[in-house]
Image (cartoon, rainbow, N blue to C red):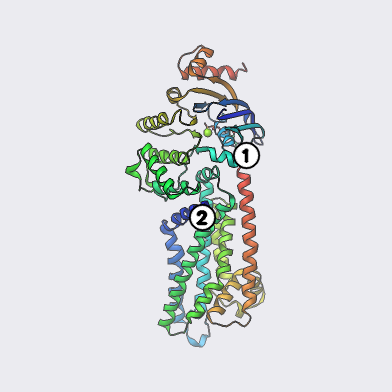
Amino acid sequence: MNAIETENLTKRYKTKTAVSGLSLSVHEGELFSLLGVNGAGKTTTIRMLSCLSKPTDGECYICGHNCVTEQSAVKGLVGISPQDTAVAENLSVLENLRLMCGIYGYSPEKANRRIDEMTELFRMSEVANSRAKTLSGGWKRKLSIAMALISEPKVLFLDEPTLGLDVLARRELWNVVEELKSKITIVLTTHYMEEAEALSDRIAIMIDGSLAALGTLSELEAQSGESGLENTFVKIAGEFGKGA
Amino acid sequence: MNKAVAFSSRNFKEIIRDPLSYIFCLGFPLVMLAVMTLVNDGIPEEAGMTIFRIDNLAGGIAVFGLTFIMLFTCLSVAKDRSGAFLVRLYATPMTSGSFILGYVLPTSLLAVLQLITTLAASFVVSLITGIELNTLGLLLTLLSLLPTVIMLIACGLLFGTLFSEKAAPGLCSIVISLASFLGGVWFDADGVGGVLLDICNALPFYHAVKAARMASALDFDGYLPHLLITLAYAVVITAASVIVFKHKMKADLQ
Ligand SMILES: Nc1ncnc2c1ncn2[C@@H]1O[C@H](COP(=O)(O)OP(=O)(O)OP(=O)(O)O)[C@@H](O)[C@H]1O
Ligand SMILES: [Mg+2]
């Protein structure tokens, strides 16, 4: 079974079609990157897949469960690290993690085990007792992702996880993502081409809400006749714009 | 229920870790209590003005303090709605009921703590000024104000849901001023009478203050209607806030 399946997925707002007829599938354990310029519809797609927004048209499924009609099943399967860092500012790192455990109804033992695992995975012990509002952008982002992971999701959505991070913090986060790869399915959005290149199994390029290209890096390179993801992206975006 | 408890504890911590909560929820009512007691001290007995005497002031300040709990409830909700944190929680199996309980439980606890503090302070003032306040009366004052606690917290939830983080505080301060004025905390509404008294009568605040003052004086002649009116307002506003919150949450997830 595919981890994610969308069929003609569409989201129309009053004046704008944010996502238009998106059909794709993401395999289990895959790291799937969604690329596209600002406003291409990446976040909207993720919102529909994590029950934060209802499709205007089409269907989407997480591990076979319909995102509209089987919301509670889907919510139990997905974790989301929103584009804007989403942490409780006046709570410490540990308290934030404990909060998520409480919301998922974990026993104290299970909560402690998961909190230990997350602090280790993100090497967060030095900031464990710091209030979130005092953390640097990098730590906050790590905490935000840890909060999405703590519920052991089958599918993790990372919406621009490395936005605004310095080179070292970004590399550290890449390492964490590498460790998670193949254990869970990850959908990543990013504006950094080298990031998508380094991490992805397959890449989808969205333009104006539609799927412009989909494949592994080498498939996309072959398709566009360019080398490197950046050149490939520019070429595909340019051709799509001409209505090719 | 677990979810509501986890979310409550987060909201409780967020509020008690904000120094402003102490200034407004505890400091301000206590300062007003002290100031008005001093003012009362300066009023000559012949003037016959007893509105700031501790037996009248205690119930008034208690209601006044509770309006700040409304402000903090409103701010918690509005702040959460403006950030991405609530979005993250929307993607968990949390229901709207757990959200509402999560906001209401910790603020109710704060409200009761605040009432205990202001009423205890009033008792101390009564000892100093030699005007008798009865401990049983103060306990009954606290109980009489429980519907008001619920009503004001529901107001906070309603305003926090409907208005942005920027608009909500301004709106709340209008309600705070109106509540303490039209509640007859700062002037003798019964003595003034007329249209002003009619307006006071139509709103819940006057009845809340009345019920509190009568309970503290152990004077239950005509007490029940005041209590029932605050209770009715509490039920209606709570229902409205729950409906609006659920509706808004559904709309956010469209
Ligand atoms: N609630 C909304 N109402 C109206 N239009 C919206 C709404 N949400 C998003 N849009 C529009 O839908 C389009 C796609 O937005 P989306 O946030 O999905 O883009 P994105 O690919 O995530 O962009 P970015 O890289 O800037 O994060 C944009 O034009 C946006 O303005
Ligand atoms: Mg986005």
Q: Is residue B201 above or below residue B49?
A: above
Front position in the image: B31 or A118: A118
Give the quadrant of residue B200: bottom right
Residue at 65% in and 67% down: B232
Q: Secondary structure at mark 1?
A: loop
> Which residue appears farthest toward the left when viewing the image?
A126
In depth, the one of A230 and B188 nearer the eye is A230
Side of A176 where B111 appears, left or right: right
The three-letter amino acid code for the residue at tag 2 is Leu
The quadrant in which residue B16 appears is bottom left
Q: Position of residue B94 (x, y in %)?
A: 55, 47
Q: Are marks 2 and 1 on the same chain?
A: no
Would you name the residue on which mark 2 appears?
B75
Asked whether mark 1 and ligand 1 are closer than 8 Å, the reply comes as: no
Question: Could you say whether the residue bearing mark 2 is in a helix, strand or loop?
Answer: helix
Of residues A5 and B221, the one nearer the viewer is A5
**Is B59 located above or below residue B67 in the figure?**
below
Q: Where does the image place residue A116, in percent across and percent down from the top left?
A: 38, 43
For the residue marked with disc 1, what is the amino acid?
Answer: Glu
A130 left or right, relative to A203: left
Question: Label 1 neighbourhood size at 10 Å, few (<14), some (14-19), many (20+)?
Answer: some
Q: Is residue A131 visible?
A: yes
- Looking at the rendered image, the disc whose residue lies closer to the viewer, 2 or 1, is 1
Residue under label 1 = A70
Q: Chain of mark 2?
A: B
In the rendered view, tell whether residue A130 sits above or below residue B149.
Answer: above
**Quadrant in which the N terminus of chain A appears:** top right
Q: Quadrant of residue B30?
A: bottom left
- The chain that hosts pointer 1 is A
Give the x, y percent position of residue B248: 62, 49
